[in-house]
Image (cartoon, rainbow, N blue to C red):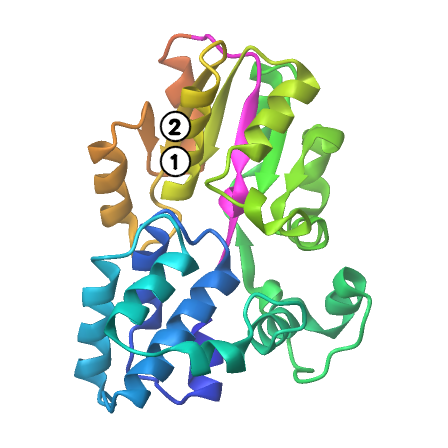
Amino acid sequence: MDFIFKIKMNLTHIPIEKLISKFRHTGGFNNDIDTTYSIILTIVYCKKMNKCNRSEILNFFLNLLEKIDDKGILSVENELEKLGEIGDIKNKLEYPKDGNIVSTVFNEIFYGKDLYMEQFKKNSKYYFGKPLINNDKIIIKEKTIQDLSKEFNGKLILISGRSRVASYFTLNNLLNYFIKDACIFLEDEKREYAKPSTYAIHKVFNQLKLKNAIYVGDSIEDFLMVERFRDENNRAKIIFCGVYGTNANSSKDLKRLFELKRADIIVENVNDIPNTLNNTKKIKPSIGYGGSRTYSPS
């Protein structure tokens, strides 16, 4: 996403990665394109209001981030509309309508022309360079997955915020350790099913007839999804394991949030989970991984 803003808007002094982390920590921005749209919308609004220098834009963002919540882009739009007219900007961006410019450019840059064709069944229009998905680095080790698969009798499930195409491209053979028919790729589902919606957990529990599970995630959306599932289904037992070290730039903030929200288990690295579980009471027959939690973009 930082790349998009440097190329398209030439705002290289705005700390985009820091802003992305803060958006993510609200719990409403598991979708990277939602985050991109919100940042573009806010920057264009600032320019419209003649807040054009770095400090003005950054301060505006920080004030905005104090007010938004897990309602995602609706929360951002509502807060901006309290300050002024944004209808003209929204009409130009047309997000999240089909074929909108934000999603199109983002996906072309992320997927690259070949995977873009595989995912969307059409040719790229704007970007033909190296895809950002090539920069993905797998954090979880195969040995970790093997250990967990053995511990849970092969009952590993992936709930990814990405598409099936993107997940298979990055994780490749590691997906062989998961129950493929039970894995969920939320980019391929309806928008309303995105995290922190409990749709994915309900679907997995119903399909596999689970009574209990451990869910591993590295975002506040993951935590909120588990908490809401608990409220909706008091017959099932689910433990949340929060991983805070996936993004070094925001690890301290995420650890603090997990602690404040009293996550059941908190670890720095996903590869620490087997040892951590060996020191806890074993009450789980299956384990689920959240989103791009087994890998992350560099």
Height in image: 262 above or below 188?
A: above
At label 1, the amino acid type is Leu
Q: Position of residue 248 (x, y in %)?
A: 32, 54
The residue positioned 41% from the left and 14% from the top of the image is 278
For the record, the magenta segment spans: 282-298
Q: Position of residue 99 (x, y in %)?
A: 67, 72
Label 2 close to label 1 by CB (< 8 Å): yes
The residue positioned 56% from the left and 28% from the top of the image is 201
Is disc 2 surrounded by few (<14), some (14 to 19) or many (20+) residues within 10 Å?
some
Q: Would residue 264 be counted in the magenta stretch?
A: no
Q: Which residue is nearer to you in this view: 83 or 217?
A: 83
Q: Position of residue 11 (x, y in %)?
A: 35, 86
The residue positioned 34% from the left and 33% from the top of the image is 267
Could you tell me which secondary element the residue under label 1 belongs to? helix
Height in image: 122 above or below 27?
A: below
Q: Would residue 292 be counted in the magenta stretch?
A: yes
Q: Position of residue 179 (x, y in %)?
A: 71, 28
How many numbered discs, if any?
A: 2
Could you tell me which secondary element the residue under label 2 belongs to? helix
Q: Which residue is nearer to you in this view: 190 or 156?
A: 190
Is disc 1 surrounded by few (<14), some (14 to 19) or many (20+) residues within 10 Å?
many
At label 2, the amino acid type is Glu
The residue positioned 54% from the left and 39% from the top of the image is 141
Q: Which mark is residue 227?
A: 2
Q: Name the residue tied to disc 1.
A: 224
- Give the spatial CA distance, label 2 vs label 1: 5 Å
Using the rendered image of the protein, determine whether residue 21 is visible from the camera's viewpoint: yes
Q: Quadrant of residue 238?
A: top left
Height in image: 231 above or below 261?
A: above
